[in-house]
């Protein structure tokens, strides 16, 4: 078997495994709309993380295990 045909077969198998997965660069949004959508998602994520940190601090969670290791 030649190496070229093996590469082609592997590419076909990988594409079949991936199916519909992966990023879709053409989502029908303009760059400005994409920036707004992504910015909103990041704000929501930051708010959720801040709420979790506040809940942990309020319940005596401390630093969450960060920076407490002894040397």
Image (spheres, rainbow, N blue to C red):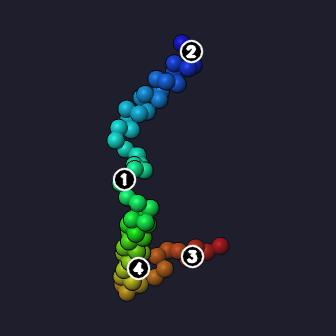
Which of 53/1 is in front?
1
First in sequence, mark 4 or 2: give its number.
2
* Mark 3, residue position: 67
Secondary structure state at the residue bearing disc 3: loop
Residue at which label 1 appears: 27
Cα distance in 3D space between marks 3 and 1: 41 Å
Q: From the image, tell me which residue sits under label 4.
A: 50
Which of the two marks, 3 or 1, is nearer to us in this view? 1
Q: Which mark is residue 62?
A: none
Mark 1 surroundings within 10 Å by alpha-carbon count, few (fewer than 14), some (14 through 19), many (20 or more): few
Does residue 67 appear in this view? yes
68 left or right, relative to 44: right
Percent from the top left, x then y, of residue 3? 57, 19
Q: Position of residue 17 (x, y in %)?
A: 38, 35
Look at 49% across and 80% down and name the residue there: 63
Badges 3 and 2: C-beta atoms under 8 Å apart?
A: no
Label 3–label 1 contact, CB within 8 A: no
Q: Residue at x 40, y 50 (%)?
A: 26
State which tag comes first along the sequence, 4 or 3.
Answer: 4
Q: Secondary structure at mark 1?
A: loop
Q: Is residue 15 above or below residue 7?
A: below
């Amino acid at each position: 078997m030649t190496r070229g045909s093996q590469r082609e077969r592997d590419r076909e198998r990988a594409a079949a495994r991936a199916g519909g997965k992966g990023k879709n660069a053409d989502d029908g949004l303009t760059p400005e709309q994409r920036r707004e959508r992504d910015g909103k998602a990041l704000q929501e994520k930051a708010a959720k993380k801040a709420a979790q940190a506040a809940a942990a601090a309020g319940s005596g969670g401390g630093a969450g295990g960060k920076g407490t290791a002894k040397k």
